[in-house]
């Protein structure tokens, strides 16, 4: 599958480019602000994962398919030994890619997700998105009002409604493949399947206020990624890059040797 992507910055001599993978319900747009900072020193690629953003839709939605998409993307653009950064679902895509293609990247940063199984916890979000009747929707404000009874947090609603756009007929449509994501949501929480440990330098970065990566996850993390470190950004939740961009950038720069 040919993924839609954004490309920022220039190639740096002998310095690997960055590939950043967004999370569930997200897109490359969510990463533009921090990527512009990183692109001062490195080339940065921001693909939209399948069934998200402007990338193609598919009935197949799992980590095997998405890691294959990533390998095809790297080969298509002749990217050499990238540093791969993945947030949440994008972090699981990055981990699956790493265990399948361990010679195709130089470093891995996994943001606020572990290789373990996560129970489905997006029921209210999915119900809220499904409740929005696109064929009668007149304004984005109406969509926000309908979603509010399912998702009380304004910031989360604003993030979700970035997926709403007007099509060529000026009607509203989703950039996410809502029906497939809803059908396959159990797969998003799947534990990482692996056959051998990944030896490349790896950082797991978590938010201090998030409960996605816990101390008891460390043995599993180091079983799969024996050269992994775990770092925490205090007072940050799950969306670390949006809540603490300065601190997040400092971690990325230090880990990847940027600047």
Image (tube, rainbow, N blue to C red):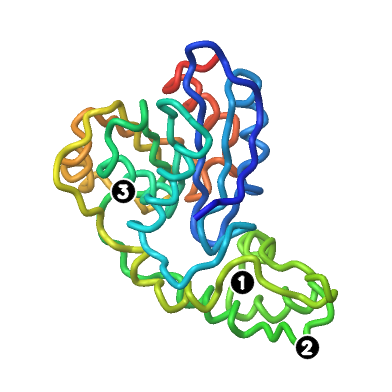
Please tell me whether residue 183 is drawn above or below residue 60 in the rendered image: below
Label 1 sits on a secondary structure element that is loop
Q: Residue 152 carries which label?
A: 1
| N-terminal-most mark, 2 or 3 | 3
Q: In which quarter of the view is residue 6 placed?
A: top right
Please tell me whether residue 40 is drawn above or below residue 236 in the rendered image: above
Cβ atoms at labels 2 and 3 below 8 Å apart: no
Label 2 sits on a secondary structure element that is loop
Q: Residue 218 carries which label?
A: none
Position in image of residue 205 (x %, y %): 39, 37
Of badges 2 and 1, nearer the viewer stands 2
Q: Which residue is label 3 attached to?
A: 96
Position in image of residue 236 (x %, y %): 50, 43
Q: Return the residue nearer the eye: 65 or 162.
A: 65
Cβ atoms at labels 2 and 1 below 8 Å apart: no
43 with respect to 236 (left or right): right
Cα separation, mark 2 vs mark 3, equals 40 Å
Q: Which residue is label 2 attached to?
A: 136
Label 3, residues with CA under 10 Å away: few <14, some 14-19, many ≥20: many
16 with respect to 223 (left or right): right
């Amino acid at each position: 599958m040919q993924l839609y992507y954004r490309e920022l910055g220039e190639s740096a001599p002998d310095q690997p480019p960055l590939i950043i993978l967004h999370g569930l319900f997200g897109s490359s747009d969510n990463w533009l602000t921090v990527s512009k900072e990183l692109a001062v020193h490195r080339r940065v690629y921001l693909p939209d994962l399948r069934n998200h953003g402007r990338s193609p839709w598919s009935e197949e939605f799992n980590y095997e398919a998405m890691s294959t998409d990533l390998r095809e993307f790297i080969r298509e653009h002749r990217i050499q030994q990238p540093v791969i950064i993945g947030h949440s679902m994008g972090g699981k895509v990055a981990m699956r890619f790493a265990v399948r293609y361990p010679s195709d990247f130089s470093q891995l940063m996994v943001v606020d997700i572990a290789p373990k199984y996560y129970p489905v916890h997006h029921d209210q979000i999915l119900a809220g998105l499904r409740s929005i009747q696109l064929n009668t929707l007149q304004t984005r404000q109406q969509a926000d009002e309908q979603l509010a009874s399912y998702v009380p947090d304004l910031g989360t609603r604003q993030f979700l409604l970035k997926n709403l756009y007007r099509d060529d007929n000026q009607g509203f449509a989703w950039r996410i493949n809502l029906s497939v994501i809803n059908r396959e949501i159990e797969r998003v929480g799947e534990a990482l399947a692996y056959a051998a440990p990944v030896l490349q330098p790896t950082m797991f970065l978590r938010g201090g206020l998030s409960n996605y990566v816990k101390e008891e996850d460390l043995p599993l993390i180091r079983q799969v990624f024996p050269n992994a470190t775990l770092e925490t950004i205090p007072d940050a939740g799950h969306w670390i890059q949006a809540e603490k961009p300065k601190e997040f950038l400092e971690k990325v720069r230090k880990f990847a040797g940027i600047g």
